[in-house]
Amino acid sequence: AQSVAQPEDQVNVAEGNPLTVKCTYSVSGNPYLFWYVQYPNRGLQFLLKYITGDNLVKGSYGFEAEFNKSQTSFHLKKPSALVSDSALYFCAVRDPLSIKAAGNKLTFGGGTRVLVKP
Amino acid sequence: NAGVTQTPKFQVLKTGQSMTLQCAQDMNHEYMSWYRQDPGMGLRLIHYSVGAGITDQGEVPNGYNVSRSTTEDFPLRLLSAAPSQTSVYFCASSSLMRDKNIQYFGAGTRLSVL
């Protein structure tokens, strides 16, 4: 069974400093990996994905993530955090070997709350 | 473009009551799903559907029913609400053809069962 771990419940960072949100995964085969962001009282919004190709993927709002197969990690990064980046971030994985009938089932991590202070 | 619309936004139920959470999408997506969000547990899949007339169970299906009579709608029914079902519920949809790995989420329904 696939699983996702986000080891930090909360990350605090000063505005302008680099931001990293950690994610590790467990899945059979090559994973499809995703990051979603949830702002207060809103649904989740897609940030970026890794399917294949370059290990460094770029997404919305200046975020990027690095896929590391040997460490089974997919950490989310932003070079310079903004106060408006304060939100709940979720890492998710889809097993591409899952049968087609299962559609686009995702397994989510527990979420990491990011607080960017001015 | 409305995307994924969930109603109601908030609901309070008494134990044993039934209700239906509504979800509609206007993107002609084949795949729709329901998740519940609980603190520290991320989102857990309740039920999903890959098309009209086809539904299947997710990770935590007990106490919930779904049906998919049209492409647009995917209601979630609680037959006899229990306090353990207090949660925030999200509906999501995605295409199985184009951009098939991106899911679009509704704004959520916050449910309290007393």
Image (spheres, coloured by chain):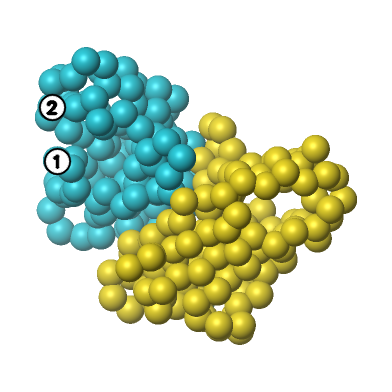
Chain colours: A cyan, B yellow
Q: Label 2 near label 1: C-beta < 8 Å?
A: yes
Image quadrant where residue A112 sits:
top left
Quadrant in which the N terminus of chain B is drawn: bottom left
Instruction: Note whether residue A5 is visible.
Output: no
Residue B113 drawn at (x, y percent): 76, 42
Task: Say which amino acid is labelled 1.
Answer: Gly
Task: Say which amino acid is labelled 2.
Answer: Ser
Marks 1 and 2 belong to one chain: yes
The subunit letter for the residue under badge 1 reads A
Residue A107 drawn at (x, y percent): 48, 51
Of residues B81 and A56, the one nearer the viewer is: B81
Secondary structure at badge 2 equals loop
Instruction: Note whether residue B103 is visible.
Output: yes
Secondary structure at badge 1 equals helix
A76 to B67, vertically: above or below? above
Q: Residue at x 34, y 42 (%)?
A: A37
Q: Which residue is drawn at 31% across and 29% down?
A: A86
Q: Which labelled disc corresponds to residue A62? A: 1
Of residues A92 and B103, the one nearer the viewer is: B103
Q: Residue at x 66, y 75 (%)?
A: B67
Can you identify the residue that label 2 sits on?
A80
Give me the C-alpha separation between circle 1 and circle 2: 9 Å
Q: Residue at x 19, y 48 (%)?
A: A60
Residue A18 drawn at (x, y percent): 16, 24
Q: Does residue B63 appear left or right of residue A111 in this picture?
A: right
